[in-house]
Image: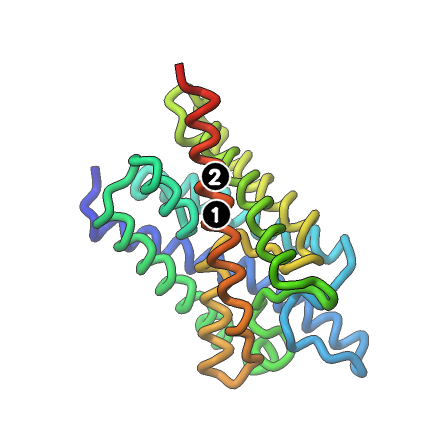
Amino acid sequence: MASLTSRSIAEGVGTLLLVYFGAGAAAITLMIAAGTKPSTTFNIGIGQLGGLADWFAIGISFGIVIAAVIYALGRVSGAHINPAVTIALFVTKRFPATDTAAYVVAQCIGAAIGSLLFFLTVGLNAVTIGGLGATAPFPGIGYGQAILVEAIATFVLMLVIMGVAVDRQAPQGFAGLIIGLTVAGMITATGNIAGASLNPARTFGPYIGDWLLGGPNLWVFFPIYIIGPVIGAILAAVFYDRITAE
């Protein structure tokens, strides 16, 4: 097994790529929309966007980069690239506390760097128009509703992870593809409700980038993207253990 340092670096790099390409696709979509509808303000999070085709494009971008990271770095760190996944594995006694803390810190740092690199690549419009792809609830969606949909979508994601990556009887070679497609599906289906984060680090990166660079201030929504995904992932891991117990 690789050292904790190497594994943490892999988690940081993997999450960096997730945010750069996934959240970056959301920001680019907003920028394109702003170009075609100059009278509309889009700088309050992708939860305002709408349009199933747009969400499919964002979702498939996330799905592809997640699959790539899993196949590239999975053998090093397991490619959690999501604090909710790491915490769920810790709660079900599959991951030690020290490693859990190191992974979560690395994932959040990687996410922040990914957002800052995207800004350096695209420029200030990525912040002021695209919000760096930050997630926010759609208008009319309450705080509790947003937490619930994040929990449900992450439950599905974690359930799939348990079946195709964690279970010792999981089919070999399919984890990246199936997990990536699951994320794409969850984002397409639920993006227009609360932004479909499913991942506290994925939301943290754009939020910290926006905060540093003068973008939208969305921190009031951040607990949604901690509580929902963590609860959903833990419930899925516990549920899977219960129904597969011999």
Residue under pointer 1: 231
Q: Quadrant of the C terminus?
A: top left
Q: 95 or 232: which is nearer to us?
A: 232
Q: Name above or below for residue 135 compared with residue 38.
A: above
Determine crowd level at label 2: few under 14, some 14-19, many 20+ residues with C-alpha closer than 10 A: many
Q: Is residue 90 left or right of residue 197?
A: left
Residue 59 position within the rendered picture, expressed as x and y whole percent measured from the top left: 63, 51
Residue 95 position within the rendered picture, expressed as x and y whole percent measured from the top left: 28, 40
> Residue at horizontal 58%, vertical 67%?
133
Q: Quadrant of residue 113?
A: bottom left
Q: Name above or below for residue 31 compared with residue 8.
A: below
Q: Residue furthest left?
A: 3
Q: Is residue 213 left or right of residue 144?
A: left
Q: Element under label 2?
A: helix
Q: 20 or 145: which is nearer to us?
A: 145
Q: Element under label 1?
A: helix
Q: 241 or 200: which is nearer to us?
A: 241
Q: Quadrant of the N terminus?
A: top left
Q: Quadrant of residue 165?
A: top left
Q: Is residue 136 left or right of residue 35?
A: left
Residue 88 position within the rendered picture, expressed as x and y whole percent measured from the top left: 39, 42
> Residue at horizontal 39%, vertical 30%?
166
Are discs 2 and 1 less than 8 Å apart at CB? Answer: yes
Residue under pointer 2: 235
The residue under label 1 is which amino acid type?
Ile
Residue 193 position within the rendered picture, expressed as x and y whole percent measured from the top left: 69, 57
How far is mark 2 from mark 1, CA to CA? 6 Å
| Rendered image: mark on residue 202 | none
Query: Number of callouts in the render?
Result: 2
> Residue at horizontal 49%, vertical 72%?
207
The residue under label 2 is which amino acid type?
Leu
Q: Residue furthest front?
A: 144
